[in-house]
Image: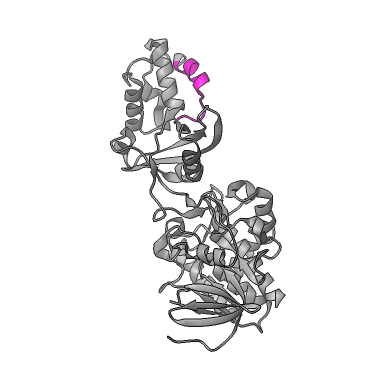
Amino acid sequence: MRTYHELADVAVVGAGAAGLMAACWAARSNPALRVVALDGAVKLGAKILVAGGGRCNVTHDEVDERAYAGSTRPAIRKVLKRFDVPETVAFFEDLGVPLKREPNGKLFPVTDQARTVLEALLRSVEQAGARIWHPRRVDAIEREGEGFLVRGAWGELPARRVILATGGKSLPKSGSDGAGYGFAQALGHSLTPRITPSLVPLMLPKGHVLTELSGLSADVRLTLSDGRGKALVSFENALLCTHFGLSGPAALDISRYVLAAMADDPQATLSACWLPDLTTETVDAALLGAGKTGLVRWVGGRLPERLTRTLAGEAGIDPSAPLNALTRPQRQALGRTLTAYPLPVTGDRGYTYAEVTAGGVPLSEIDLKTMESRLCSGLHVCGEICDVDGQIGGYNFQWAWASGYVAGLSAAHAL
């Protein structure tokens, strides 16, 4: 076993988005410090490289706590305010990575290449004077005196302060295999009772009619309701039918809520409104007003024709029949199918396909001014390991930039 006979002032465990940000700002804030980031990956930045379809959705033009779940929104807001979107844009601009806004508010590098973002971050860490050791998988972090001992098969590294930025459990091939949770617990932290995939595709029963429409997408409103029928949360966005069930932004955004509801309330239901401008109450009059038009023509370009015909079959009507000729029970059945179509979710595709993790270290155990542990002095926690997960659209990266910035800056200032 090779042992490094040197002391790190700040050891950053995990060199993903939050870890690189933390290492950069720790070194920038105090160039005299020895800052070392450790990561088990042979090639760094796997999550950054696959984000946004390989383009890396760096952030969103409007970010606030309402786009997040997990710990309390006021707590999340405190951290987001420390490094906001304009500061993020300026930071990457300074690194030579200008961002562009797309119509949906997402901000991407003008190169449309995630590698541009990763290389700029790695360069910023190097230019700040910090070092990255990889592949150097950390197997344990122990308290040693007033500091820490970071250990792995490669040896051990004493450190005065540690920043835990190991990520959660999503995309385990990237190195986020949940090991950080064990480190946090060993150093005195608790974890939320439930840790699940988030922004994850949802499964439908094998043979469900929507699985026969793989590849079709539509703008819908998904609503999650409890066993008594009370709406809990809804998202309006694109839904993608797949061979296994549901994907696309609407399904991904609502997934963490669906999984939680399924665990707590077996009677909870997920439904789709295929025509978000209509409700079950208004669709009857709308169908009557359609005259002799058939359903396919009436729906027009709002839904793919194959999907419209499938929904007509689910409602038990002829998709070409004049709508004003439908009986009241037929109109009611069609109205329910179009606006409250049940989606019997059987599960999710797991961490391998999840973009982030829901749950983790509660923010109540962290000083939000510094991201320092309230339970273990000298330990800072940032990124996905925290009990914070955002919607699709760059929100999770913004949490990584903000929490990593606060952790790095504060660790350096403390020394």
Viewer-nearest residue: 134 or 59: 134
Above-or-below relation of 177 to 13: above
Quadrant containing the C terminus is bottom right
Single out the residue that lies furthest toward the bottom: 5
Magenta region = 274-287
Work out whether residue 28 can be spotted.
yes
Confirm whether the magenta stretch covers residue 285. Answer: yes
Residue at image position (56%, 35%) is: 232
Viewer-nearest residue: 366 or 218: 366
Residue at image position (49%, 35%) is: 265
Q: Position of residue 341 (x, y in %)?
A: 42, 28
- The answer to which quarter of the image holds residue 394 is bottom right
Quadrant containing the N terminus is bottom left
- The answer to which quarter of the image holds residue 124 is bottom right
Work out whether residue 113 can be spotted.
no
Confirm whether the magenta stretch covers residue 283. Answer: yes
Above-or-below relation of 61 to 263: below
Is 244 placed left or right of 399 in the picture? left
Above-or-below relation of 19 to 343: below
Viewer-nearest residue: 2 or 188: 188
Viewer-nearest residue: 139 or 281: 139
Q: Position of residue 105 (x, y in %)?
A: 56, 49
Number of marks in picture: 0
Residue at image position (47%, 29%) is: 275
Q: Position of residue 339 (x, y in %)?
A: 46, 26
Above-or-below relation of 120 to 276: below
